[in-house]
Image (cartoon, rainbow, N blue to C red):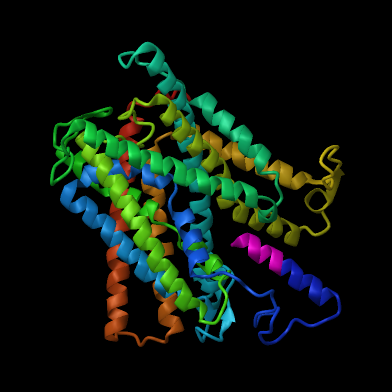
């Protein structure tokens, strides 16, 4: 996606510097924007979307279903899938500004907002996007450390029995993950992390499939389906005490945020669409790819959420593979949690690279004479015949500080479900609904107060209310957890 964009961008730049002119119309080798012919199809786009969507968010779906129950749980999952599909189709129509077939291409989400809405909305989109990226980095640090702890505890339970508390301090594992990210963050840009991204994609399918398989096995072992029509019961004992009526409401709201987080991929939709060949028009191919992807993902999510709830009922863990609803086979749990850690190492970099690039490009723009910011030092690599590594001191210092900051915040707020809920709530309405709806209205010149305009605004307003509820529930969960929490002494 971004890798293809960067590579083709460089090729276009070299063509122009070589004294020629980029082609004005499509040809055998170039598209209408002068870049090399795109080769993506409905199947490659579907694969990109499915890989991007199925991530660590799937692990909290059993817990989310347990808060909502057998009626509301699957219904909410279906509604989120429908809204995601519909607004993704609106966004796909905005890949080209003006005409959906011949208009100017937008290569990124921000560029689409710039060309369709402009002004303050671009700055607002940028703030939300980059805040979300920072939040994802924090969330991934928490999730990775919990999975490392789970491996340690699973082995402890296997050796000492399930009655042993097997308490483990989470702080050292967050530090370990942070050190790994400091090293990987020195990879300059997307061009060099394709292998890491592909490895992360394989790992995400690995642990998701293991979680689903264990859920099915557990239901078969229980010989009954647990859970109720209305979700977790008042008075149920949890790690933070008995569930009250107020907590039941907050937990239901938090579940909305967890489901929203599991479906979020709008930020990269335009970039995926930029890989698709034409004809047919890119937006037509993207609509088909979105339909295939959302159906596939929803079926997978339904299975994971429903089988997890059927297996554990009200006691469904917040993270299906680390909450120790499962104890055996312990080696399979170790494989699943190791896959989560490997996936999150790669996913952290994929999500943070746009933020890294933004800060570094902005610094270079404002301080073009600074040697600290712009100069590189060649570090020879004595094996493998590789080119020297180009060390940039500003990149080294700023990226290291960023990883240290996200790791520190993760130590201060190590609540997986709460962070997932906050990220889902904060990103869902503006990025998945509001901006696609507003851009589509501008793109198609839909008259104000027309039936279609009113319908789109009602959809946007309803999703805003859902996001506010989800955020409120997630923040309430954080406040509840903080009552019994001591900083830097996180024990699992």
Q: Nearer the viewer, residue 303 or 74?
A: 303
Which image quadrant is residue 213 in?
A: top left
State the image coordinates of residue 110 (x, y, percent, origin top left): 55, 67
- Quadrant of the rendering where the C terminus is positioned: top left
- Quadrant of the rendering where the N terminus is positioned: bottom right
Q: Kindly tell me whether residue 406 is visible in this rendering.
A: yes
Q: Residue at horizontal 44%, vertical 68%?
A: 289
Residue 323 vertical placement versus 361 (above, below) = above
State the image coordinates of residue 382 (x, y, percent, origin top left): 86, 37
The magenta span reads 1-8
Residue 5 part of the magenta segment: yes
- Is the magenta region chiefly helix, strand or loop? helix
Q: Residue at horizontal 53%, vertical 73%?
A: 112
State the image coordinates of residue 218 (x, y, percent, origin top left): 26, 34
Q: Nearer the viewer, residue 95 or 289?
A: 289
Which image quadrant is residue 331 in?
A: top left
Q: Residue at horizontal 47%, vertical 77%?
A: 283
Q: Kindly tell me whether residue 465 is visible in this rendering.
A: no
| 326 sits left or right of 112 in the view | left
Residue 420 vertical placement versus 315 (above, below) = below
Residue 237 vertical placement versus 136 (above, below) = above
| 382 sits left or right of 227 in the view | right
Q: Nearer the viewer, residue 238 or 114?
A: 238
State the image coordinates of residue 363 (x, y, percent, origin top left): 71, 56
Q: Residue at horizontal 38%, vertical 68%?
A: 291
Q: Nearer the viewer, residue 215 or 102?
A: 215
| 186 sits left or right of 71 in the view | right
Number of labels in the image equals 0
Residue 381 part of the magenta segment: no
């Amino acid at each position: 996606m971004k890798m293809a964009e960067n590579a083709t961008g460089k090729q276009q730049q070299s063509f122009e510097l070589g004294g020629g002119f980029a082609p004005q119309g499509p040809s055998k080798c170039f598209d209408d924007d002068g870049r090399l012919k795109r080769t993506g199809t409905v199947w490659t786009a579907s694969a990109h979307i499915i890989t991007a969507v199925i991530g660590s968010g799937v692990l909290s779906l059993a817990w989310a279903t347990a808060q909502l129950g057998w009626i509301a749980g699957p219904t909410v999952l279906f509604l989120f899938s429908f809204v995601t599909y519909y607004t993704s189709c609106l966004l796909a129509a905005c890949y080209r500004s003006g005409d959906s077939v011949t208009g100017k291409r937008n290569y990124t989400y921000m560029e689409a907002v710039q060309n369709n809405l402009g002004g303050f909305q671009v700055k607002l989109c940028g703030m939300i996007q980059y805040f979300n990226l920072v939040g994802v980095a924090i969330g991934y640090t928490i999730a990775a450390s919990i999975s490392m702890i789970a491996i340690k505890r699973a082995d402890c339970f296997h050796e000492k029995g399930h009655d042993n508390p097997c308490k483990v301090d989470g702080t050292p594992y967050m530090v370990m993950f942070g050190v790994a990210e400091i090293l990987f963050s020195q990879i300059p840009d997307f061009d060099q992390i394709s292998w890491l991204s592909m490895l992360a994609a394989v790992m995400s399918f690995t642990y998701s499939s293991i979680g689903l398989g264990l859920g099915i096995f557990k239901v078969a072992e229980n010989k009954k389906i647990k859970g109720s029509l209305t979700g977790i019961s008042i008075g149920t004992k949890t790690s933070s005490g008995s569930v009250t009526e107020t907590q039941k409401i907050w937990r239901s709201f938090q579940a909305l945020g967890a489901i929203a987080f599991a479906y979020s991929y709008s930020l990269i939709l335009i970039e995926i669409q930029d890989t698709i060949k034409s004809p047919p028009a890119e937006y037509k191919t993207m609509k088909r790819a979105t339909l295939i992807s959302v159906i596939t993902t929803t079926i997978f999510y339904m299975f994971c959420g429903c089988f997890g709830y059927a297996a554990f009922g009200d006691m469904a863990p917040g993270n299906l593979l680390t909450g120790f609803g499962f104890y055996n086979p312990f080696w399979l749990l170790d494989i699943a949690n190791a896959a989560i850690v490997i996936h999150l190492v790669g996913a952290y970099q994929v999500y943070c690279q746009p933020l890294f690039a933004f800060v570094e490009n902005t610094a270079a723009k404002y301080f073009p004479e600074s040697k600290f910011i712009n100069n590189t030092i060649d570090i020879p690599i004595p094996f493998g015949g590789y080119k020297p590594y180009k060390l940039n001191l500003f990149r080294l210092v700023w990226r290291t500080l960023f990883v240290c900051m996200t790791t520190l915040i993760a130590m201060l707020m190590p609540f997986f479900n709460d962070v997932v809920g906050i990220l889902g709530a904060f990103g869902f309405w503006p990025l998945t609904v509001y901006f696609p709806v507003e851009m589509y209205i501008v793109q198609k010149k839909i008259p104000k107060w027309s039936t279609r305009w009113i319908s789109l605004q009602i959809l946007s307003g309803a999703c805003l209310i859902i996001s506010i509820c989800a955020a409120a529930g997630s923040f309430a969960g954080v406040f509840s957890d903080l009552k019994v929490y001591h900083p830097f002494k996180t024990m699992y």
